[in-house]
Image (spheres, rainbow, N blue to C red):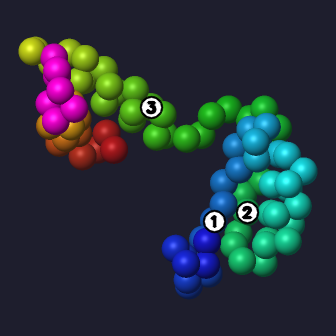
């Protein structure tokens, strides 16, 4: 966090996933809590991560392409083209 947000403006968002609530993760967060701000989300809170929604929209856009991408390079091109077709307000 100190490397990415050296100005001390980093914020850690924990989504209460089991992995983030383990004893090891909880201990690490407590030991390093002075290095960043931490959002406290209520347990079993609704998903607040927009990345999954954008990923789903992007994959749906690629699936609608004709012809479908057949190679890794075709897929990369289709993803980039689909990304550029999203209206700026969507993102």
Residue at coordinates 79% horizontally, 71% vertically from top-left?
A: 33
Number of the label disc, if any, that sits on residue 53: 3
Q: CA distance from mark 3 to mark 2?
A: 23 Å
Magenta stretch bounds: 68-74
- Res. 78 visible in picture: no
SS for callout 2: strand
Q: CA distance from mark 1 to mark 3?
A: 21 Å
* Foreground residue among 16 and 19: 19
Locate residue 66: give its quadrant. top left
Specify the quadrant that holds the C terminus: top left
Report if the CB atoms under discs 1 and 2 are less than 8 Å apart.
Answer: yes
Locate residue 59: give its quadrant. top left
State which tag comes first along the sequence, 1 or 2.
1
**Residue wearing tag 2:** 38
SS for callout 1: strand
Q: Position of residue 37 (x, y in %)?
A: 70, 69
> In the shown orientation, is residue 44 left or right of residue 47?
right
> In the shown orientation, is residue 45 left or right of residue 9?
right
State which tag comes first along the sequence, 3 or 2.
2
Magenta-drawn stretch contains 5: no
State which tag comes first along the sequence, 1 or 3.
1
**Residue wearing tag 1:** 11
> In the shown orientation, is residue 81 left or right of residue 8?
left
SS for callout 3: helix
Q: CA distance from mark 1 to mark 2?
A: 6 Å
Question: Dot 1: within a 10 Å radius of its alpha carbon, few (fewer than 14), some, or many (20 or more) residues?
Answer: few
Q: Position of residue 74 (x, y in %)?
A: 14, 30
Residue at coordinates 21% horizontally, 37% vertically from top-left?
A: 76
Specify the quadrant that holds the N terminus: bottom right
């Amino acid at each position: 966090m100190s490397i990415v947000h050296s100005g001390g403006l980093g914020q850690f968002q924990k989504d209460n996933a089991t992995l983030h609530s383990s004893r090891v993760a909880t201990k690490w967060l407590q030991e390093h809590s002075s290095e960043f701000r931490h959002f406290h989300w209520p347990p079993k809170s609704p998903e607040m991560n927009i990345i999954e929604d954008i990923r789903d929209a992007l994959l749906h856009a690629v699936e609608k392409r004709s012809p479908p991408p057949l190679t890794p390079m075709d897929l990369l091109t289709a993803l980039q083209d689909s990304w550029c077709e999203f209206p700026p307000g969507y993102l």
